[in-house]
Amino acid sequence: MGREIVIGLVGKPSSGKSTTLNSLTDANAKVGAFPFTTIDPNKATGYLEIDCACKRFNKQDKCKPNYGYCRNGKRGVPMMLLDVAGLVPNAHLGRGLGNKFLGDLTEADCLIHIVDASGTTDAEGKATRGYDPLNDIEWLQNEIFEWIMGNLKERWGSVVRKHVGTKQTTLETLRQQLGGYVANTKLIAQALDIIPNLPPLQDWDDEMLGNVVRAFMQVKFPTVLSLNKMDHPDSDKNVSKIILKYPKSKAVLCSSITEVFLRKLVAQNFIKYDPGTEFVDTKEDLPDDASLKPLDEKLKNRIENIRDLVLYRFGSTGVVQLLQAAAELLQLVPVYPVRNIHNFTGNSGDFVFRDCLLVKKGTPVISVARKIMGDVTIAAIEGVGGIRIGEEDTVDVGKNDILSFKLVPGSRN
Ligand SMILES: Nc1nc2c(ncn2[C@@H]2O[C@H](COP(=O)(O)OP(=O)(O)OP(=O)(O)O)[C@@H](O)[C@H]2O)c(=O)[nH]1
Ligand SMILES: [Mg+2]
């Protein structure tokens, strides 16, 4: 059903990418306190938490998604997460795992830059104290820039000659040059729209080419900053600096190691914990809960610490909010295709809202149909209440987000 949304976790070695991946999924990526623990990209499914449509219609007890989960109206919609190998300064020149890392990135729709906010690892991921993580933010963006710019400049002379010779449009030429980064014409057009008064391609100097690359990065690699290791006492001052310097960036305070630990305790029946919240309950809090095991002094103290240092201070470990921030940046809207628009059931049984896909806000409903069913002939599209919806009407949060597609009989191939 269409292409999944892919989120790339990036950052220097030892910033906590694998720990974050583990905290968001059931994956067991190798975690280590030394650089380059991860070499091949680890893929895993994470779940974006949203308010499910079943809640709107008070049908929580009948909601059973085909993929992901729905717990009392809180739905987890699958997203593909990609943990890419640690990147070091000058990777674009082939340092570290250089170009391999950069190549792995192209699959992503959005990046989460895991920043070690504690300053306890240097530019290359080695243990230190007092390192300024502001450097990492600049340097990572710069690395991606140099990589794309370098690839373009290498052949720019012949690109321009061909462009002039074949009288192609700028968009066509760039589509040929940037398509390899998994970018379609629409995305490249969006990037070009960012630059006012764009001169003809054959007149671009290095500065203009740089502007085009930066605009391309904005649309191809929108980035959420994960300010990780917030449990560390040195993190606070660094976070203030980062937020002051990048007020427009989407930043989420995180402690992924805390989330991993809490999930482990849940699996061992030591606590009840609702990911994404500050609420942790132990046997002491819920003495009547027979499923909970009592804690020893050591564990009790650790949980108290986690409450004080992370949960009560920041409201949560932050990891659930990371995917929500990525979805906001991509302007994703959950859309529910249903067979029966009156009771929201699917092909069989009486469970509701079996499917949910994430599409960009403003997508015409006909494109949603194509994503799901391919090239079929649609007779009609219905929304809640059986109301007819025009093919070009667009989806938004809570608007045209529950759809039933009526096909012309025999049109499905
Ligand atoms: N204090 C603290 N330490 C963390 C946190 N997240 C990760 N770490 C530690 O940081 C170290 C590196 O974590 P990894 O998840 O392996 O880092 P990585 O970014 O995947 O590293 P590479 O695979 O080498 O690129 C490990 O010792 C983790 O336990 C956190 O939230 N707080
Ligand atoms: Mg790793």
Image (spheres, rainbow, N blue to C red):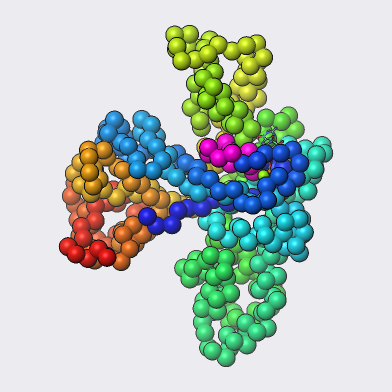
Number of labelled discs? 0
The N terminus is located in which quarter? Answer: bottom left
Per the picture, the main secondary structure of the magenta-coloured stretch is: helix
Q: Which residues are magenta?
A: 17-28
Residue 70 visible, this angle: yes
The C terminus is located in which quarter? Answer: bottom left
- Which quadrant of the render holds ligand 2? top right
Up the image or down, 207 lies above or below 263; here it is: below
- Residue 62 image position (x, y, % from top left): 27, 34
Residue at 48% in and 12% down: 286
Residue 308 visible, this angle: no
Looking at the image, residue 110 sits to the left or right of residue 381; the answer is: right
- Residue 367 image position (x, y, % from top left): 34, 62
- Residue 330 image position (x, y, % from top left): 49, 53
Looking at the rendering, which quadrant does residue 217 occupy?
bottom right
Q: Is residue 19 magenta?
A: yes
Of residues 9 and 149, the one nearer the viewer is 9
Looking at the image, residue 230 sits to the left or right of residue 234; the answer is: left
Of residues 110 and 299, the one nearer the viewer is 299
Residue at 52% in and 76% down: 171
- Residue 312 image position (x, y, % from top left): 58, 24
Looking at the image, residue 44 sits to the left or right of residue 29; the answer is: left
Q: Is residue 307 magenta?
A: no
Residue at 42% in and 43% down: 77
Up the image or down, 403 lies above or below 311; here it is: below
Residue at 34% in and 54% down: 395
